[in-house]
Image: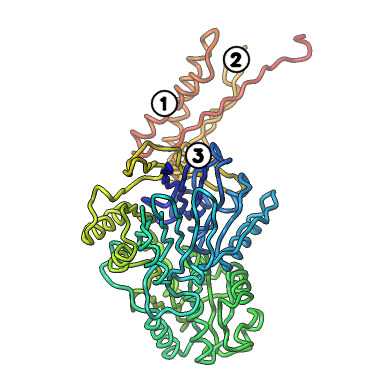
Amino acid sequence: MSKIKIIPLGGVRENAKNMYVIEIDDAIFVLDCGLLYPEEMFGIDAVIPDFTYLEENQDKIAGVFLSHGHEDSIGALPYFLERFEVPVFGSELTIALAKMYVEEAKLDYEFDDYHVVDEEMEIDFGTATIRFFRVTHTIPDSMGIAVKTDAGHIVYTGNFKFDNSASGDYTTDYAEIVQIGKEGVLALLSDSLGAASLEENVSDVRVQEEVFNTFKNTENRLIVAAVASNMLRIQQVINAASHFGRKIFIAGKRMESILAIALKLNKLTVPDKDLFVPMSEINKYKDNQIVILETGSLGEPLDTLRKMSEGRHPQITIKEGDLVYIVTSPSTAMEIYAAEARNSIYRAGGTVKALSSQVKASGHGTPKDLQLMINLLKPKYLIPVQGQYRMLVAHSDLAHLTGMRYENIFIVSNGEVLIYENGKMMRAGEVSATDTLIDGIGVGDIGNVVLRDRRLLSEDGIFVAVLTIDRKKKKIIAGPHIVTRGFVFVRESQSLLDEASGIVTKIMNKQLEKNDFEWGELKAEIRKELLAYLSQKTGRRPIVLPVIMEINQKRWYDK
């Protein structure tokens, strides 16, 4: 019997950054390689999984297997391929989008070991066989992944929902799921983002009707905000624009790139050849002929809408009468930001309508969907993935209602190791799975200390004391000069600054009286005394930086 390990390196107790390691004897299969866009991380562009464990075992990696083309599943691939030369497998659209993200990252390497797979294929790696099955999500060609071992299948659903109205490249392969279940499922890693939902998803046919109604009842310009990679929603907007005689103008480079790929692969249907019009020709059309499709990744549509409403967008300014139609459902953490965007739009004279206020439309399964997946696959063990902790717990409770015992359900943390041996799944320690932060071109060079400093800077500002000393003559040559940003209004706080300057002078003169002193101890004392004083007087704790420069005033005739 093979020794099996299951290790999530990302994607549990969080809503993205999916990466799951399935280790069977001496072979490692990596399922998904996603990133997470931070909601508030002070300049951090993205968060990717920690690759330490994979680097320690890179000779064992058989390949990376991608479930679908959203960034929560493929966004970290450019950084992964910078370190590992292993094959990448995925559906036609998923591979095309993965190539786009790798090229956009402009990292210093070349990679071309991509392999397009479909639900008809099985890949035999000796210790395991990999096969795929179609699932319904908001992007075509989404697939679940089944890793067949001698102990049964380990199934990863990817992001999924059940919708019997889905068609074409969005359909679910129920027959294949049932067949895998009959063959025996050892463990199920299942999407949990909808586990706590109190409403069922409406069918995508119903969503299309709602989009049609909005277009039908709007006489002014329509500005549609959507996530670029939500192709299902983009298709519904295309259908409505064509039906009601409107032209589509793209505001967003990411959408242009994704649209080109989707059209080339016939993953989007465009009824009219002249439906898309360059933004430079928008003034040739009446307001009731215009749809501005504004897209981005995750929270980006909201940010761009604010720029449009405040006159900071290079192409579009929201004007009186515009209807902004938000067809992207912001996460709970983005609700305040979404509210600010709405206020800004109304101040500009526009109005806002959100699809989420009309229907429950999500690409993630609701409780009934999750229970149906469990009943079809009949896993021995369940590992809820992708979702905050409360969602994983909700998923666990749903599984228990289907008859699964809680002891067969594992709610794990990133980096926690599950081992299956001697006929039993058990916890077996942890591996490194800290967040790797992407900041500009830097990968992993920003840590918790830097983030803490950025947070403090954002909250209480910075206080800098600068002085120049001559240690030989034991005197202060210049300063202390006080520089502060984000702490107090200088003109109204001169007495505070003068007192702070006096504290620095006193400490410095005391130290200069000594024959010698330690620079580290000096700066630490200044920092401590200043922080205590400033905190007492203002109730704030800025970052305090003493800057001390030393000179020797030696003249030519002193030689």
Which quadrant does the N terminus fall into?
A: top left
Residue 210 in view here? yes
Question: Are the residues flagged by discs 2 and 1 in contact, CB closer than 8 Å?
Answer: no
Q: Which residue bears the numbered disc 3?
A: 53
Question: Are the residues flagged by discs 1 and 3 in contact, CB closer than 8 Å?
Answer: no
Residue 357 in the image: state x and y as whole percent: 33, 75
Task: Judge the density around disc 2: few (<14), some (14-19), many (≥20) Cα neighbours within 10 Å.
Answer: many
Question: Looking at the image, which is closer to me, 23 or 143?
Answer: 23
Q: Secondary structure at mark 2?
A: loop
Figure label count? 3
| Mark 3 residue type | Tyr
Question: Looking at the image, which is closer to me, 112 or 103?
Answer: 112
Q: Which mark is residue 276?
A: none
Q: Nearer the viewer, mark 2 or mark 3?
A: 3
Residue for point 41% across, 54% down: 154
**Cα gap from disc 2 to disc 3, whole angstroms:** 51 Å
Residue 463 in the image: state x and y as whole percent: 48, 36
| Mark 2 residue type | Arg
Residue 394 in the image: state x and y as whole percent: 26, 57
Q: Secondary structure at mark 3?
A: helix
Q: Which residue bears the numbered disc 1?
A: 528
Question: Looking at the image, which is closer to me, 226 or 26?
Answer: 26
